[in-house]
Amino acid sequence: MIWYPYQQMKTMKDPYKIIDAKGVWLYTEDNRMIDSVSSWWSVIHGYKHPVLTEAIKSQAERFSHVMLGGLTHDPVEKLSATLEHWLPGDLNYSFFSDSGSVAVEVALKMALQYYVNRGELHRTKVLSLTHSYHGDTFKTMEVGDDEDYHFILEAYGSNPNVVHVPTEIPALETAFELCHEDLNCLIVEPLLQGAGGMRMYDLSFLKRARELCDQYDVLLIFDEVATGFGRTGNRFVADLVLPDILVLGKALTGGYIGHAATVANQKVYEGFYDDDPDKALMHGPTFMGNPLACSVAQKSIELFEQEDYLTKIRRIEAVTRREMEGFTDPRIKEIRIMGGCVCIEVHDPEVLAGYQQFAYERGVFARPFLRYLYAMVPYIIGEEELVAILDTMKTWFSR
Ligand SMILES: *Cc1c(COP(=O)(O)O)cnc(C)c1O
């Protein structure tokens, strides 16, 4: 029996069974639908991309996995060199893991140990944003502020080592003034908070965050598991404001296989670089640097560059703005658009009940949650298919 994610098993309706997938299309036995979710925002090149499929196949014919403890291999060396070259600034040191949550855990561990290695044992606090989501593992749940995880607060009470602030500069300044001595890091989903409701905020907040982190010697972590690889219309938000640690996941492998990276800058790396073995980073997921994942990630990045994905994403944003222009409904609170993300926030979650089946019948796969009806499409989508998704969203409100 499969225990499905985020589902009340007693009341959930049967999931759609996928038998094939190609481009933006998912196929069931008797229907096909455009994937407006990109399999949790990861399948940026669409399904069954010949270049990516070939990358996995040819690596599988050599070896599918070896551990990274005491061993290394071409795919991981190549990917790490590519990231070193491709990522902005001195974000040069990639620690690989198997999922975004684990990569965030690694970032949080790095930030804490960075100061412990310097003898600053009191720096136990993490500053993060209200409505943030950083993953499903225990520490990432605590650092995040997802409504679904507030049961932890009920059970344990509020965590003295996590401080939440809204995305407002005065609140951020106050938080730094009050607790900078105990902070090891500020962690944010930059510009776009995904699972917390596709909330978008201004770059000026991140610029101020960078200044405050510099002023008080606190590490800045960008969790770009969702925003990375073009989703906001920028390649990475880190191209605009440089963090000390960058976390990548989801689209890293073009959605082919789970993998993630925690990328540190020179300063963080040097905080561990020592003759003392106790100052080493103590982490090592079994499948870190998996050769299949690294091979496909490498090809995914090459495609992103060769086929000028940033132009594709700008076109997605332009078409979305054009189609949504002037669209309103009293049930809608706000429509937000940024890069390859569009979100209709409604006042009452009941308004979205039944939408998934409605979309299915119109050849679109969607998965609204709480008060949010959104699309985060594969970047290879054609205009006609994109318009079909947006029309389906709009038609829902015209019933
Ligand atoms: C999805 C997500 C994660 C967790 O990634 P998993 O691979 O699901 O563990 C972490 N941070 C952000 C911002 C995400 O969107």
Image (cartoon, rainbow, N blue to C red):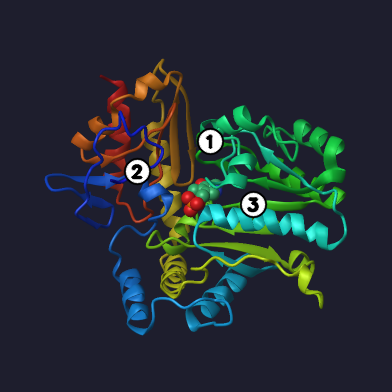
Residue at which label 2 appears: 3
Tell me what residue is drawn at x 32 percent, y 28 percent: 394
How many neighbours does mark 3 have within 10 angstroms: few (below 14), some (14-19), or many (20 or more)? many
Asked if the residues shown at circle 3 and circle 1 are in contact, with their CB atoms under 8 angstroms apart, the answer is no
Which residue type does callout 1 highlight?
A: Gly
Which residue type does callout 2 highlight?
A: Trp
Q: Secondary structure at mark 2?
A: loop
Examine the rendered structure and indicate whether residue 211 appears above or below residue 51.
above
Q: Quadrant of residue 152?
A: top right
Front-most of residues 233 and 284: 284
Which residue type does callout 3 highlight?
A: Phe
| Residue 128: image location, x then y, percent | 68, 41
| Residue 132: image location, x then y, percent | 59, 38
**Label number found at residue 196:** 1
| Residue 50: image location, x then y, percent | 29, 70
Asked if the residues shown at circle 3 and circle 2 are in contact, with their CB atoms under 8 angstroms apart, the answer is no
Q: CA distance from mark 3 to mark 1?
A: 16 Å
Residue 283 shows in this picture: yes
Residue at which label 3 appears: 222
Tell me what residue is drawn at x 41 percent, y 66 percent: 307
Q: Quadrant of residue 174?
A: top right
Q: Is mark 2 within 8 Å of ligand 1?
A: no
Front-most of residues 65 and 61: 65
Frontmost of labels 2 and 1 is: 2
Q: Earlier in the sequence, mark 3 or mark 2?
A: 2
Tell me what residue is drawn at x 41 percent, y 30 percent: 325
Give left or right: position of 205 versus 360: right
Frontmost of labels 3 and 2 is: 2
Residue 239 shows in this picture: no
Give left or right: position of 152 versus 14: right
